[in-house]
Image: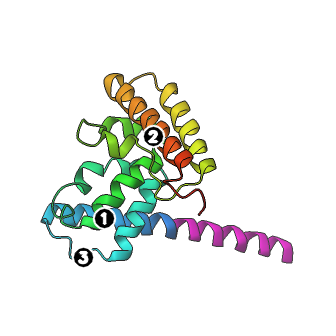
Amino acid sequence: MKRVIIVVLTLLSLSCSSENVTSAEQRLSDKVLTASGNNDSTLLLEADYDQITEYLSQGRTRWIELYPILKQSPFSGVTSFQEGVDIAMAYALPENPEVIIKFVTLSNVDKLCGIPFIEPTPDETEAYFLQTRAALNRLTFGGAERKRCLAVLENSHHLLAAEMRQGKVSSQK
């Protein structure tokens, strides 16, 4: 009987904790949509912006779909957030290329499809490049955007590799 009670309580706590995660994410999504609709981002805290970029970098579709909204007013005035959004999208590219490729344009292709690391190790760069290239090559759609994205990725990889060979980029974290 004690075991049954423990199992039931464990299952309830797991279900409650997953509901809290979902509801916290939903609340943040609602805050973003409200801020966008009212053209007023004062309800968002720095921690909210950090969480948004975290969700983006994880490749969560709901947040990637908000990319056009996050690039407009009232969010366009938050410079560090704008840089973070593009970097997060690049991090998410190997995780969810099907959705990200829809937002690749001539004006953002270098940011979304380049290698997003500040001080990468050669192993990080190579792993990201291989994973992202494979993800983009698996796409059966995307046409010009996919090809452009692949070209930027490959060019970024070659340039970074050359810089690392010349010692211009730190090879340690």
Classify mark 2: helix, strand or loop: helix
In screen coordinates, is 133 left or right of 109? right
Disc 2 marks which residue?
159
Classify mark 3: helix, strand or loop: loop
Alpha carbon distance from label 2 to label 3:
41 Å
- Please rate how many residues cluster around mark 2, counting C-alpha atoms within 10 Å: few if below 14, some from 14 to 19, many from 20: few
Alpha carbon distance from label 2 to label 1:
26 Å
Disc 3 marks which residue?
43
* Label drawn at residue 81: 1
From the top left corner, tell me how far across and down residue 171 is, in percent.
59, 56
For badge 1, the amino acid type reads Phe
For badge 2, the amino acid type reads Leu
* Label drawn at residue 98: none
Give above or below for 59 relative to 80.
above
Q: Quadrant of the N terminus?
A: bottom right
- Please rate how many residues cluster around mark 3, counting C-alpha atoms within 10 Å: few if below 14, some from 14 to 19, many from 20: few
Classify mark 1: helix, strand or loop: helix
- The reply to whether the magenta stretch includes residue 25 is no
First in sequence, mark 2 or 1: give its number.
1
From the top left corner, tell me how far across and down residue 98 is, in percent.
43, 35
- The residue range painted magenta reads 1-19
Q: Quadrant of the C terminus?
A: bottom right
- At a point 39% along the width and 39% down the height, the residue shown is 99
- At a point 46% along the width and 48% down the height, the residue shown is 92
For badge 3, the amino acid type reads Leu
